[in-house]
Amino acid sequence: MALSQEIAERERAEKDLLDAEQFFHATIDSLSDHVLVLDEAGSVIHANKSWCDFSLYASAGFSYLHLCETDRRWFGNSGIEFACGIRSVIWGMPSSFALEYEYRSGDASVEEQSRWFQGKVSRFAGGGPLRVVVTHIDITKRKTMERALQQSQRQLRQLAEHLETAKEDERKRISRDIHDELGQNLLALRIDISMLAARTEHSHPHLYQRVAKVLGNVDATIKSVRGIMNELRPLVLDLGLQAALEWQIKDFKKRSGIACELLVPDDAVFAAIGSKVNIVLFRIVQEGLTNVLRHARATRVELCLQAQDEQLILSIRDDGVGVGPEQGKQSGGFGLLGIAERIAALGGDFDFGSSRSGPGCSLIVRIPLAGQGQRPDEVDCR
């Protein structure tokens, strides 16, 4: 009696398990994604209609692991990698796995027939035999949109770089035109007025006073023109980055009264920098010092320029009020956005926020020299 009851209970459990599996298979048959159910050996025990229509393989009875490893329509080694992922799930390490891959559904030479999928593997072993569910989701449209977006971003970056170059060229042209035309005319005018002042100093005192005022106005105009020229593009840039940075720091100290120091562990670094990077670094320093003057309330600024791990590293640190965590994450204003675009166009990156080595704020810029190196932490030039 007890034996027959045990047999009946076992048959009932097997029937419930079979019904549950049939329900599970019916459920995945209704899905538009390509879904397979594998056993612990990696063989297909069920595949929905979407998979069969796509793959033209039988719905059951073949080794899916073998298919992944031998089907040449998987791009690169994706099939082998996916098979390894399935095995790791079967072994329980981990319990799920996902992989995005490219699959050539027809002639591999025809690019239009290449499609993208996201393969997902999940393990089920709750009280019954081990089952592994493999789902392939067609993400071709998403990948196409991502590629189009990346292409648009590249084109926008190229356009921004072109506009930046054109702007620098225009600044250079205007600055030189001012120097050659307006500057020389003002200098000639000053010489004439100086001669008139020398002749009238003793013979015509009242006229001399008027001439002296005119001479002062001319001097003020010359000074203003020089300031405009330096704002557009300092002529000292033609002497190289080192001279330009030293001039910029000297001018900053004069205008702000803030102590500022440039540290260059090895002067040979300037020889490794091209003219395009020279302009970018100068503008970054210019923008950085302007931000310090406007916002930092600092008493000291330190700049460091050096090469490390195939990268050119520029750091600007101050001892001011610093920035909060949220401020560091935000782009701030167009100044930082401009810095970001300039650096990105050169394949570099930057960090901005409160300094980790003390009070104040730090801006760390990294630009590849010959190739991509490791990203160093903040460089301490002290």
Image (tube, grey):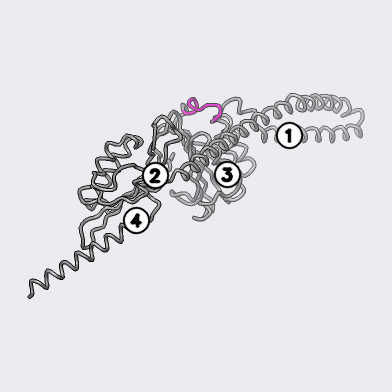
Observer-side mark, 1 or 4, equals: 4
Label 4 amino acid?
Ile
The residue to which callout 4 is attached is: 28
The residue to which callout 3 is attached is: 337
**Residues under labels 4 and 3: Cα distance?**
49 Å
Label 2 amino acid?
Phe
Observer-side mark, 1 or 3, equals: 3
**Residues under labels 1 and 2: Cα distance?**
66 Å
- Quadrant of the rendering where the C terminus is positioned: top left
Observer-side mark, 2 or 3, equals: 2
Please tell me whether residue 273 belongs to the stretch shown in magenta.
Answer: yes
> Going from the N terminus, do you reach mark 1 or mark 4 first?
4
Label 1 amino acid?
Lys
**Residues under labels 4 and 2: Cα distance?**
18 Å
Q: How many marks?
A: 4
In the displayed structure, would residue 54 be above or below residue 326?
Answer: above
The residue to which callout 1 is attached is: 223
Observer-side mark, 4 or 3, equals: 4
Drawn side of residue 326 relative to residue 226, left or right? left
Instruction: Tell me where the magenta segment starts and ends, as one range.
Output: 269-276
**Residues under labels 2 and 3: Cα distance?**
36 Å
**Residues under labels 1 and 3: Cα distance?**
31 Å
The residue to which callout 2 is attached is: 117
Q: What predominant SS class does the magenta segment belong to?
A: helix
Label 4 CA crowd tier, 10 Å (few <14, some 14–19, many 20+):
many
Where residue 348 appears, as percent x and y from the top left, is: 48, 37
Give the residue at x 21% y 61%.
128
> Going from the N terminus, do you reach mark 2 or mark 3 first?
2
Write down the quadrant of residue 309 in the picture: top left
